Image (spheres, helix red, strand yellow):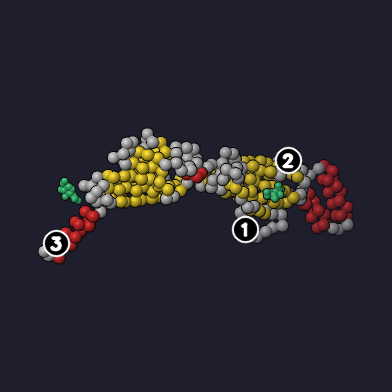
Amino acid sequence: MTAVELLLALLALLDFASGLKLTMLRVPSQKLRSSDVTLKCFYDLQNGTLYSVQWYKDNSVFYRFVPADTPSGQMFPLPGVTVDLKGSNDNQVILRLLDLDSSGTYRCEVSSEAPEFLTEVAEAHMNVMALPKDPPKITGLRQKYNEGDPINLNCTSAPSKPLAVLYWFINGNQIIPTGKDSKDGPFLTQYRSVTDEEGLEYVTLGLRLAAKKKFFNNLLHTMKIRCTSSMGVLMWHVDLSTHIHAVSAASLTSCFLQTVWLLSAFSYLFAHKFCANLL
Ligand SMILES: *[C@@H]1O[C@H](CO)[C@@H](O)[C@H](O)[C@H]1NC(C)=O
Ligand SMILES: *[C@@H]1O[C@H](CO)[C@@H](O)[C@H](O)[C@H]1NC(C)=O
């Protein structure tokens, strides 16, 4: 026997020793709450005979298929795992009505009969998500502000799993913390997330700014506010708008009179500044 022949013989032996192979495991990484899922596990016994296929979630068995047993398929209750026995067999297991506690690591374990008694396993994680039922809510917005008034808003996401991420927009521009704070804002305040009794999470993002003209459309005296909540590529948003009081005829007249008076007193610059604040 040459070295090559010996090697080939050894490889053939090794191949025989691992005569059972898992060829495919399909466990989706993300599923929605209340949906169903089909987990798949395909194997190649080569010349062996199937003894059992067992499915585990987080190391606890919930389904066993043994061809020699009657019935072949059996389930074991686990929180969050509702097996559809009719639709399940040695290659797949159907879970109905997924819930948050259906999230976990799913393992398929295939074993062959005597004389080999081989066992192969494969596992993957599945996450069950709950989408928010509503768009986020904005609180604290008044219909009108006077120039310079503080605007204090909160945007709160609807409960979801995982937690949604919130974004504020003013007149279509996203508010990004720059580190360079202007005294008028906008400032963001990220509050701690809260977990409700169902296990869903929500969070509040505060927005604070001064009602300055630069934030309002000059003609309509309007500021458009949007808060968006997002979970990956999915987005929900709420749009509101508010106004700044237009400069009243009385203050315009006063500005004019002051200007005339101040001009006569050679204080043009001061008058200009005073009016600029009003307009
Ligand atoms: C499987 O069995 C066939 C014939 O039944 C045989 O030719 C083949 O070598 C066997 N394969 C293994 C891996 O034992
Ligand atoms: C915004 O929400 C936080 C946290 O819930 C709360 O402490 C704060 O008073 C709220 N502010 C406004 C303006 O509603």
Looking at the rendered structure, the secondary structure element under dot 1 is loop
Three-letter code for the amino acid on which mark 3 is drawn: Glu
Do callouts 3 and 1 mark residues in contact (Cβ within 8 Å)?
Answer: no
Q: Residue 71, position in %: x, y?
A: 33, 36
The residue that disc 3 covers is: 5
The residue that disc 2 covers is: 143
Three-letter code for the amino acid on which mark 1 is drawn: Thr
For the N terminus, the image quarter is: bottom left
Count residues near mark 3 (Cα–Cα under 10 Å), then give few for <14, some for 14-19, many for 20+.
few
Do callouts 2 and 3 mark residues in contact (Cβ within 8 Å)?
Answer: no
Q: Nearer the viewer, residue 66 or 181?
A: 66
Q: Nearer the viewer, residue 27 or 56?
A: 56
Residue at position x 63%, y 60% in the image = 179
What distance separates the C-alpha of mark 2 from that of mark 3? 88 Å
Q: Which mark is residue 178?
A: 1
Residue at position x 66%, y 43% in the image = 138
Q: Nearer the viewer, residue 137 or 36?
A: 36
Looking at the rendered structure, the secondary structure element under dot 2 is loop
**N-term mark: 2 or 1:** 2
Q: Which mark is residue 168?
A: none
**N-term mark: 2 or 3:** 3
What distance separates the C-alpha of mark 3 from that of mark 1? 70 Å
Count residues near mark 1 (Cα–Cα under 10 Å), then give few for <14, some for 14-19, many for 20+.
few
Three-letter code for the amino acid on which mark 2 is drawn: Gln
Residue at position x 60%, y 45% in the image = 196
Q: Residue 39, position in %: x, y?
A: 38, 42
What distance separates the C-alpha of mark 2 from that of mark 1? 28 Å
Q: Is residue 252 left or right of residue 74?
A: right
